[in-house]
Amino acid sequence: MKRDAVGLDVHGLRSLVGGMPLVSEWFTVDQARVNEFAKATGDHQWIHVDPDRARRESPFGGPIAHGFLTLSLIPSLLEQTVKLKQRMGVNYGLNRVRFTSPLPVDSLVRASFAVASVNDVDDAGVQVMWNVTLERQGSERPVCVAEFITRHYF
């Protein structure tokens, strides 16, 4: 389910607690993105950036995306999935994060966002706990599961 009509206010956001997850569109993680992430983070491990070697030597059969690249997709996939009528939103942090299976380069990935809680915080804001599952098209196992915390000011 996608929520993108006119955008949700704080009451609409609260109404999502315990409801069906919101699901993003599919997104392709290609080699160019993996290479740019490697450049930005300094993580040039061959299983990510050397497709020929990864096909020959990796237990994954080819290059895979960095786990932290996969994790970094969460905020943009959330923004594409649910529109909020807010002044500002910030990433507040993560609790439990697990990379439960590899994400091969050129795979399609999408995220589901289930709202676990919405709590009032200082300065007329709310803190939201999202249970996030990133799945790869064609795979039974998710590639990442996380508790993602955001703050929103309306």
Image (cartoon, rainbow, N blue to C red):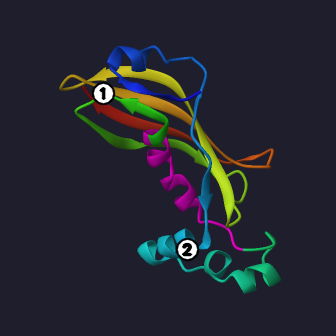
- The residue pinned by badge 1 equals 85
Q: Horizontally, is 154 left or right of 38 in the view?
A: left
- The residue pinned by badge 2 equals 32
124 up-or-down from 92: above or below: above
Report the residue that reaches farthest toward the front: 5
Magenta range: 63-79
SS for callout 2: helix
Q: Residue 22: horizontal and vertical position, in percent?
A: 56, 30
Please check the rendered image and state whether residue 146 is part of the magenta-colored stretch, yes or no.
Answer: no
Disc 1 and disc 2: Cα gap in Å? 33 Å
Which amino acid is tagged 1? Lys
- Label 2 neighbourhood size at 10 Å, few (<14), some (14-19), many (20+)? few
Determine the residue positioned at 50% across, 18% down: 17
SS for callout 1: loop
Q: Residue 132: horizontal and vertical position, in percent?
A: 57, 38
Q: Residue 133: horizontal and vertical position, in percent?
A: 62, 40
Looking at the rendering, in which quadrant would you find the N terminus? top right
134 up-or-down from 61: above or below: above
Specify the quadrant of the image occupied by residue 64. bottom right
Which amino acid is tagged 2? Ala
The secondary structure that dominates the magenta segment is helix
Please check the rendered image and state whether residue 72 is part of the magenta-colored stretch, yes or no.
Answer: yes
